[in-house]
Amino acid sequence: MTKEELIHQIRIKRSFLCIGLDTDINKIPSHLLELDDPVFEFNKQIIDATKDLCVAYKPNIAFYESMGVSGWNSLQKTLDYISKDIFTIADAKRGDIGNTSNMYARTFFENMNFDSVTIAPYMGEDSISPFLKFKDKWAIILALTSNKGGLDFQKIEDKNGKPLFEQVLVTSKSWGTDRNMMYVVGATRSEQLSKIRKIIPNHFLLVPGVGVQGGSLQHVSKYGMNDDCGLLVNSSRGIIYRSSDIDFAEKARESAEKLQHQMDILLSEKGI
Amino acid sequence: MTKEELIHQIRIKRSFLCIGLDTDINKIPSHLLELDDPVFEFNKQIIDATKDLCVAYKPNIAFYESMGVSGWNSLQKTLDYISKDIFTIADAKRGDIGNTSNMYARTFFENMNFDSVTIAPYMGEDSISPFLKFKDKWAIILALTSNKGGLDFQKIEDKNGKPLFEQVLVTSKSWGTDRNMMYVVGATRSEQLSKIRKIIPNHFLLVPGVGVQGGSLQHVSKYGMNDDCGLLVNSSRGIIYRSSDIDFAEKARESAEKLQHQMDILLSEKGI
């Protein structure tokens, strides 16, 4: 998907919501377990119930990989089921030396047809550049993550007082463009967003951590939104696990709708 | 596998060689392609030809994942085929927030029965600690990698002149012990090994980059070996792709034997 197409979807849907399909067989409603492929069936019903409210879906690959072959099948079926006007993110946090990263890129972009993959930057340029060679595909680089351990290394400052995550932004932005790279910035770190926007004014940010992890949609939007919106705000558990009963998809829609309404207002306030 | 068992294998085999099973369907001898599972057949013949010369096998997961379901099947068959007295490394470079890293740990430790997984440290403690909760299993943390991009961030110095990879060592070593954690240090960075050994005298190091990438076994041993050996030196392409003909396994054995002979001498020189 191109940047223009993504922005267009945000404008017409009045939403910059990404829904995390972190589908855990141990957490889905028990009535689904009798079916052939409970994970896909869960995802299908979540997608049916929310596809007009969000602009992206983000399956975290760990949940599928942990189920072996059946998990990969559920993932591929889920991806095939998502309409092409919705942005898809393989939340895989991959990254290896060049020829190996190229293998990962082919897996997610060619074999599975994801629009984007999340990548850890620790191994530097040749671990990321192979993901930038695919037309209309995106590398989403971890910058400042929302988890507790995110502070262990990402905020270490160099001699000039610049934290590691800023160096990741400054250095990596020259490897690609705002049309094939995005960055992960956790909603729990929204106080850093103004500074981040000075370094990368035009890149899209993928923002996890709103909801269960405690981040605020208002803060994220206030400090992170640019004239194109420039945000994909993710919610996973706060949407997909609202109910463990037969009404799970309905409850998921309720939560997604609430976020979409707030996003509509925030977009309007920004004149988008 | 416990640390004692690994050291015992190194002593009796007179080897600290790890063979990287980076098996690429486009690079294996064409006569294998007629078989049901060419990737497993290639690995099986490599293992048969080298299992007395090495103490570890390291499949890079990208190569299997890129083949989808058939790749995962080949990987599982390969792992089941490796004798339990040989250490196995899932070179996956995973790492995610706590509950998700736990999924990855279960995948590789429980479902597939690997002894160890490589992990990127960017997301900090809660991305690594879930891998440390499994008995006799190991987390192998990226510290200083052998690729060109390894210098982009890993050598950035803080206010006290301490580069990032040293901070990763200093901080992370308290998360586990030298009985459930190892570190990746590229052979192309052997000038750093003395300093690294001062920080982590007792941990095993997984050292890629000998051979095709240009690292020297002698330098690595001189600066990195401790009284338990403490090294697993990996070679992938330099062993498994020596010939693209019917003699590929024989040629692989030749290369492995050459390295094992050198390792025998280096171990003896150290009194091991």
Image (cartoon, coloured by chain):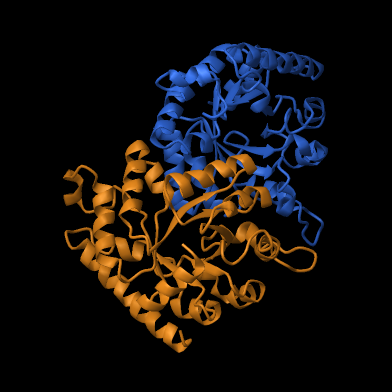
Chain colours: A blue, B orange
In depth, the one of A174 and B185 nearer the eye is B185
**x and y percentages locating residue B265 in the rendered image:** 39, 85
Q: On the picture, is A180 further left or further right than A40?
A: right
**x and y percentages locating residue B192 in the rendered image:** 60, 73
Tell me the quarter of the picture where residue A13 sits.
Answer: top right
**x and y percentages locating residue A182 in the rendered image:** 63, 36
Q: Residue at x 46, y 54 (%)?
A: B91
Location of the C terminus of chain B by quadrant is: bottom left
In depth, the one of B255 and B272 nearer the eye is B272
Q: Which residue is drawn at 39% across and 41% down?
A: B66
**x and y percentages locating residue B168 in the rendered image:** 67, 61
Q: Count the labels in the image.
A: 0
Taking A22 as reference, is B22 above or below it?
Answer: below
Q: On the picture, is B109 further left or further right than B81?
A: right
Q: Which residue is drawn at 25% across and 62% down?
A: B48
Asked if residue B124 can be seen in this view, the reply is no
Taking B103 as reference, is A5 above or below it?
Answer: above
In depth, the one of A115 and B13 nearer the eye is B13
Asked if residue B159 can be seen in this view, the reply is yes
Q: On the picture, is A125 further left or further right than B9?
A: right
